[in-house]
Amino acid sequence: MTGDSALRIIATNGTERDVGLVMQEVGRRARAAARKVALAPAEQRNAALLAMAEALRARAPRILAANAQDLADGQKSGLSASFMDRLALDDRRLAAMADAVADVASLPDPLGRVLAEWTRPNGLRFERVATPLGVIAVIFESRPNVTADAGALCLKSGNAAILRAGSDSFRSSTEIAAAMREGLEAAGLPGDAIQLVPTRDRAAVGEILSGLGGNIDVVVPRGGKSLVARVQSEARVPVFAHLDGNCHVYVHAQADLAMAREILLNAKLRRTGVCGAAETLLVDEACAATHLGPLVSALLEAGCAVRGDAATQSLDPRATPATEDDWSTEYLDGIIAVKVVAGLDAAIDHIERYGSHHTDAIVTADETAAARFLAEVDSAIVIHNASTQFADGGEFGFGAEIGIATGRMHARGPVGVEQLCSFKYRVHGAGQIRP
């Protein structure tokens, strides 16, 4: 069954049962493709990635035409400006997408790495070796570039990908996925290694979360809180995800004010809609007299609304009162909560109570305080004297990321090609038997 025929079945009958049958076939094809790409040499996988990049460039007119239709539909349905921005493609963004796929080819091969090795007294030699996870399902919403990013990362790590695009980006993602398939086949790899779910029907999401008869190994949701919550609640396979990005900047008593100001403005306002954007500013009471006022003024003058505690409001009447809910809110907008805390312990306690274990930063010249913060804050990413907006796989040197995970599985923080690998043990003997 081809992707096109599957789409016709769904479109003609429109029943959940038919969606289920199609998705089961998608899963079976992905599993078969995964076995082939797992055994493909690095040179072949890299050749496919470079061919994908060329196919994206060659198909640019078709991709942009499809995106124009998606944008027109989004305009009619009243999508927000920020949502439309995430959906939109142009020549520059499409070129960057193709370049990103090509860049993944230049990353070191994550497969076959010997992660550890040792020899036992009986002469058995053990190796722990990196292997692919298998079939990775990615469920995403408005960003069509995820089709290329996720597909490229999965292939580089020897996995097959099942990609479920949001209905708003369906046409754009379909054209991008066609380019990815073209690149795979040009390199002699199965096109089914990267499959876009061929329907907008939401029943397909439920089928993916069921695991498709054991054919999905990991699910990665990329989208809003409601999508991630559903995936985490219903998935019958492991999930790499984060529910919230409630990130903090803590300005310690020994913070340089100028540095704190630059870090804070970047962490909050560089891009307010990303999961690494700071949502709460904590200021040590020991430096509040000198630091709080200038930091709050800088935020307000940059167009950021401030919701503050009593100490913050007393310094600047432009700050509105913060409620209990504000301390745990991911605004994804030009809004920040501000609180004065009684030292390092209080800051750590606040982050533990209200934070989302995503990304939290301390600004200080005190290396001992920084070391405690980095050790005791239980977040996937902890930062000293830098912006929380570095919570990005590209900035980590991973080339790209499939998402950021805040769980405690092996994939924590930005999920790049190495995190998309599992491992197995190779045991070398010389005739040993167990007594």
Image (cartoon, helix red, strand yellow):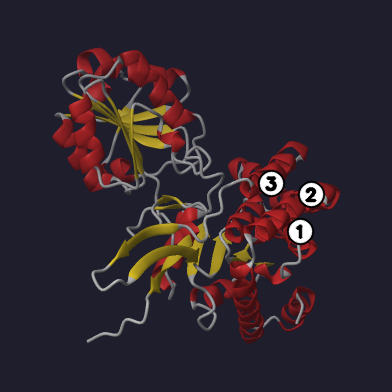
Q: Amino acid at mark 3?
A: Ala
Q: Position of residue 270 (x, y in %)?
A: 50, 29
Q: Secondary structure at mark 3?
A: helix
Q: Quadrant of the C terminus?
A: bottom left
Residue 365 vs 139, above or below: the answer is above
Would you say 103 lies left or right of 52 here?
left
Would you say the residues marked 3 and 2 are in contact, meaning their CB atoms lie under 8 Å apart? no
Q: Secondary structure at mark 2?
A: helix
Q: Amino acid at mark 1?
A: Gly
Question: Badge 2, how many Cα within 10 Å: few under 14, some, many 20+?
Answer: many
Would you say the residues marked 2 and 1 are in contact, meaning their CB atoms lie under 8 Å apart? yes
Would you say 410 lies left or right of 91 here?
left
Which sits earlier in the primary sequence, circle 1 or circle 3? 3
Q: Is residue 275 visible?
A: yes
- Residue at 47 percent across and 40 percent down: it is 396
Residue 322 vs 123, above or below: the answer is above
- Residue at 19 percent across and 29 percent down: it is 369
Q: Nearer the viewer, residue 244 or 411?
A: 411
Question: What residue sits right under mark 2 in the picture?
Answer: 54
Question: Badge 1, how many Cα within 10 Å: few under 14, some, many 20+?
Answer: many
- Circle number at residue 183: 1
Within the image, what quadrant is residue 127 found in?
bottom left
Residue 376 vs 296, above or below: the answer is below
- Circle number at residue 102: 3
